[in-house]
Amino acid sequence: MKKTVKPATIAAHAAGAIDLQSGGVVPALQPATTFVRDADYGLLRTDNIYSRDNSDNLRQAEAVLQRLENADETLLFPSGMAAIAAVFRTLPNGAKVILQSGIYWGTTAWVRMFCARRDITLTEVDADQLIASCVAIDIDLVFVETPSNPWLKTVDIAALRAVTKALLVVDATAATPILTRALDHGADIAMHSATKAINGHSDVLAGVLSTADKGSQTWQDILADRKMAGAILGPFEAWLLTRAMRTLPLRVKCMSQNALALATFLSEHPKVDKVLYPGLPQHPGHEVAKQQMIGGFGSLLSVLVTGAREDALKVVGKLELFLRATSLGGVESLVEHRHTIEPDTGIPENLIRVSVGIEDIDDLIGDWDQALG
Ligand SMILES: *Cc1c(COP(=O)(O)O)cnc(C)c1O
């Protein structure tokens, strides 16, 4: 496949993956765990030995993501958390880490536990203070999330890169590689939960890391650890992911348009106090988001409805099209009352997190209109 084609073309063609054996225009699913040798004990394919190392289906999915991300190399993991853990496991005992605060709760909870066990100094810093903190402290790793979940804060990756030599890891799950290519802005590693919009059909759990420098020691450690410790994505999941990614640019475009329209509608509604969405001009991160995000602001927003916990839960209960479920980035719209899930982390009780899907925007706005009453 040509090197210069644009993301929608890379995705639609699955980076050129076809089935060479049958001539099928889509790659075959190959679930084998082990691969045969000939009479001279040579492998039929030297890169296929045992499926804990790698597999064709995994490489096909990784090739699509590597091209979309503009990366030197990309690795898939069995979940987003497994990808994050793979990065942190490369740290030596006693290392120093800065973690953005108010991000995906699963990340915060796991990183706290891991750092405590390894005598790693962990400093949690709000998005607005990241630059100042990174200048002041000598650190090994900085982990940020942009836009963040559920606060929708925006981190200026290039500005952060300019002040730190630490390993800069960006969780860009809410942006996807279509809207933000973190490596292009100076990140060392771009991370995504592929469970979210990259797969987009709420039926595959996966995580992804992409590097700007596959020769770096950190990346070599991640690669060796995945292979030897076995945090590998199965061929079926990889095959489903490759299938789903054919429409990734299309889905992301539609979800971003829908999310902006819904955010605009809600921000003008009398029963809404505030809407957090980087696409709104009044959002504090809007200028950074405009520079850093290409062609849209993503599917994720948070709505603070007028009133208290009961009022938010009443609205959530009245919604008919937005399914009440955790997660984000799927073709179907979802809502979540974050305070119920994460009661002790400062999430306002009137906050409803919304993941906007690809349904008709008139139906989505109509649903919120009737639910707000
Ligand atoms: C869901 C999510 C993760 C974790 O990914 P899993 O695939 O659920 O393990 C990490 N970061 C963000 C921003 C997420 O939304």
Image (tube, grey):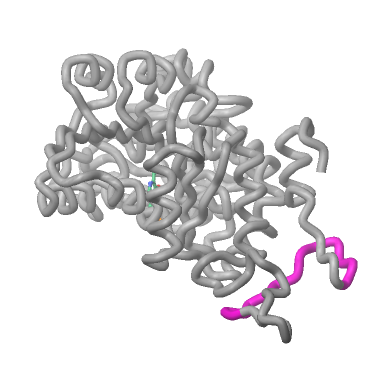
Q: Position of residue 199 (x, y in %)?
A: 58, 55
What segment carries the magenta color?
A: 22-34
What residue is shown at x 38% (from left), y 58% (from top)? 225
Q: Is residue 117 magenta?
A: no
> Who is closer to the viewer here, 132 or 355?
132
Judge whether residue 326 can be spotted in this image.
Answer: no
> Toward the viewer: 1 or 284?
1
Question: Can you say whether 106 is above or below 263 in the image?
Answer: below
- Residue 107 in the image: state x and y as whole percent: 28, 48
Q: Relative to residue 83, is residue 16 drawn left or right?
A: right
Residue 87 in sight here: yes
Tell me: 125 left or right of 218: left
Horizontal side, residue 226 vs residue 178: left or right: left
In the figure, is residue 195 to the left or right of 110? right
Provide the major secondary structure of the magenta segment: loop
- Where does the N terminus fall, quadrant-wise? top right
Location of residue 269 in the rendering, given as x and y in whole percent from the top left corner = 43, 28
Which residue sits furthest bottom? 39
216 or 25: nearer the viewer: 216
At 88% from the left and 72% from the top, the residue drawn is 22
Q: Residue at x 40, y 65 (%)?
A: 228
